[in-house]
Amino acid sequence: MNAQLIDTRTDTHVWVEQYDRDVNDLFTVQSEIAQKVAQHLHAKLSASEQASVEERPTQDLVAYDFYVRAVSMIYTAQVPEESLGIDTEKTLSEAVDLLNRAVARDPNFFLAYCQLAFAHDLIGDTPERLALAKSAIDSAFRLRPDSGEAHLALAWHLYWGYLDYDRARAELARAQQSLPNNPRVYELAGSMDRSQRRWVDATHNLERACELDPRNFPYLVNLGSTYLWLHDYDQHAKIMDRIVALLPERRRERIFRASVEVYRRADTGPWRAELEKILTNEAGSEKDPFMAGQRYTLALYDRDWDTASSLAPVLSQKNSLEWSFPQLDAGLGKKEEALNEGRRAMELGSSVKNSFTEPYVKICFAIICAWTGERELALGQLEALTKTPGSHTYGNFRLSPMWDPLRGDPRFEKIVASLAPKETVSK
């Protein structure tokens, strides 16, 4: 194995060493590499950090192999990609199986319990799944009651499973005491900040997570989407460029990068070109549900109803259905049914303490109001909503047929103009 330390500022090698050892010396080699890196960085390790470097996570190499494979699966599953065969739930379930096998071989494998809890939480928030996650966390605390990793696992569980921000932040603070430079601490803090609309803190913490782990794809996605919600399209584009350079095989991210000018200027050119390029060069892309969804949206923006209709059979069945019925009722002219269902969804959305759910619900309700003739109600929703960060963009309001009933209304046109880039407004 070759180990090397590179100064990315100058692209020069600071240290290089080759290791040719027996596989049973894996943990010794890992410890040696960590200490050599610290030495060449002139970093002074604390007693706890030194102990962490020298510690073996398990004595069972087979269990460790299960663990490493599971961690890789959990990392990959956090951002699905149909074209690469990445199915989140299936991949996470396989990771859970590997971690269960790891702790069966070594019941004292602390880190495996932490990852097992993380995987269970990511799969879903059913009572059964949350109970499995908590059981793994309890095993972690049983082994190391004062460990920062155990407190971090509990913090994630309280946030992801229950949106219990106060208790999650208390556990995260305990975790940070012993994990001051752990990127997962900052990533979780930033995720909670964003959910609670603490946008300055969210950006700071997510940027710090990406600084500490600059090649972490899920962290970059989280930061990039935050910039998009803040309508900071330049920073969003830079993050998407990093993601595409890191993982050029990922189709979704290439499309998202090409979509920036749609959001910013209602310019579908780069987006359209990327979709056509994929359809031409990547076999099977016409059957990709995500691609179908992108092409469907583009067809709607073009008012190309025939193409939109032809894509319906390919569209993913995983889209949120809670809004299908009220929007369908609105389209069929069932005004009262649509409005009542929309108001009910608004109540449910506002009860969820998450910045992503409530704005989405409000957008959908505004669409229902627009199509049922409740123009004032629709405009009131949009005026309030567009004054805060969110997924609403100039491009969507300019191009989507969902807003056609409001076009020409001075209040709606003012809302659209408020989202436009300055150079567009000046024209």
Image (cartoon, rainbow, N blue to C red):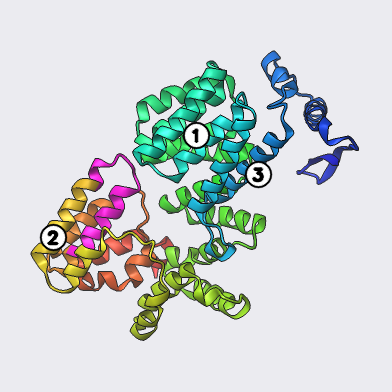
x then y, percent, for residue 74: 56, 45
Amino acid carrying mark 2 in the image: Leu
Tag of residue 117: 1
In the image, which residues are magenta?
Answer: 349-368
Side of 373 where 78 appears, left or right: right
Q: Residue furthest front?
A: 104
Q: Is residue 393 positioned above or below 24 on the image?
A: below
Q: CA distance from mark 1 to mark 3?
A: 16 Å
Between 265 and 204, which is closer to the camera in this rendering?
204
**Residue topped by disc 2:** 339
Amino acid carrying mark 3 in the image: Arg
Q: Which corner quadrant holds the N terminus?
A: top right
Q: In what element is the residue under mark 3?
A: helix
Q: Residues within 10 Å of mark 1 (few under 14, many from 20)?
A: many
Residue at x 70%, y 39% (from the top left corner): 65
**Residue topped by disc 3:** 69
Q: In what element is the residue under mark 2?
A: helix
Q: Is residue 370 positioned above or below 137 on the image?
A: below
Q: Residues within 10 Å of mark 2 (few under 14, many from 20)?
A: many
Between 276 and 94, which is closer to the camera in this rendering?
94
Q: Is residue 407 positioned above or below 319 on the image?
A: below
Q: Residue furthest left?
A: 336
- Residue 198 seen in render: no
Amino acid carrying mark 1 in the image: Ala
Residue at x 83%, y 30% (from the top left corner): 25
Q: CA distance from mark 2 to mark 1?
A: 40 Å
x then y, percent, for residue 378: 18, 60
